[in-house]
Amino acid sequence: MNYSKKQIKTEDGSTTYRMEDLKENYHSLNGAITESHFVYITEGFNFWTQKNKDRECNILELGYGTGLMTYMSFLEADRMNRFINYTSLEPYPLTIEEVNLLNYDQFFENSKDLMTFNKFSTISWEETHKVSPHFRITKKKICFEDYKSQKFFDLIYYDAFGAHVQPELWEPELMKKCYSLLNPGGAWVSYCSKGSVRRGLKEVGFSVYRLPGPPGKREMLRAVKK
Ligand SMILES: C[S@@+](CC[C@H](N)C(=O)[O-])C[C@H]1O[C@@H](n2cnc3c(N)ncnc32)[C@H](O)[C@@H]1O
């Protein structure tokens, strides 16, 4: 999105971008790393791996943004000794300079031997890369609305900007698309806990769970395909 971005520090000390014109940030002000890890790794990937002991996990992320969540998933796959096949969608990629300026490597000092965040960010778009024994990634410059897939996913990380910025991404029509992209037992997770989104998820067939949220937020949502 072609709006001017300002780097800001969030509660846990990690940085993110804010688009003042839209009054929207790439991550929560309560802690970019803390919240992303809690919502998507703990309540998404860790939840799924507990229920599926031996299978590889197919993850779809909307949208790639800074790459922070993708990188944390890459680290978690290695830590848990599980294989992730990761697809991330992003119609408006940040420049490599914008990503490097966030200085995320300082928060992942112990992970440099595996691959630094800055190196990870140079992985090319539109191709599939096996970047470690535990992680395969495909980054696609495309809107979720236009994305078509032959394969199904076990997890959807639904990390769109808020409904005040992109209401169309939170409508039941796209929740239906998420449902159709998941394997049975697959889960959709998001920081969002809006009642209208919850109702939309239920309407298209998901079992919806309101979970205690990350620090600073009361709730988040997990929706499971029956
Ligand atoms: C809240 S940010 C995601 C932050 C990201 N997960 C991270 O770790 O940095 C939302 C992202 O969705 C992208 N986006 C906007 N419209 C989209 C669409 N129609 N389909 C997929 N992604 C979209 C934005 O450009 C932005 O990068």
Image: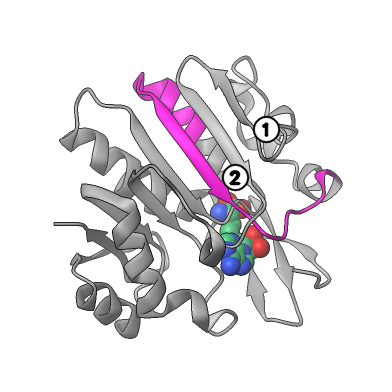
Which of the 4 image quadrants contains residue 188?
A: bottom left
Q: Would you say residue 36 sits in the magenta stretch?
A: no
Image location (x, y in percent) of residue 49: 25, 34
Do the numbered discs 2 and 1 sit on residues whose CB atoms are within 8 Å? yes
Total numbered circles: 2
Q: Does the residue labelled 2 lie within 8 Å of ligand 1?
A: yes
Left or right of residue 198: residue 215: right
84 over 40 or under it: above or below: above
Q: Quadrant of the C terminus?
A: bottom left
Image location (x, y in percent) of residue 170: 44, 76
Q: Would you say residue 92 sits in the magenta stretch?
A: yes
Image location (x, y in percent) of residue 130: 56, 21
Q: Residues within 10 Å of mark 2 (few under 14, many from 20)?
A: many
Give the magenta-colored segment's residue range. 73-96
Q: Residue at x 82, y 50 (%)?
A: 95
Q: In which quarter of the image is the N terminus?
A: bottom right
- Whichever of labels 2 and 1 marks the residue nearer the N terminus, that label is 2
Residue 27 appears in view? no
**As shown in the figure, which amino acid type bears the numbered disc 2?**
Leu
Residue sticking out furthest to the front: 150
Q: Residues within 10 Å of mark 1 (few under 14, many from 20)?
A: many
Circle 1: element type = helix
**Which residue, given by chain and number where applicable, does mark 1 sit on?**
117
Image location (x, y in percent) of residue 113: 63, 14
**Which residue, given by chain and number where applicable, does mark 2 sit on?**
68
Which of the 4 image quadrants contains residue 209?
A: bottom left
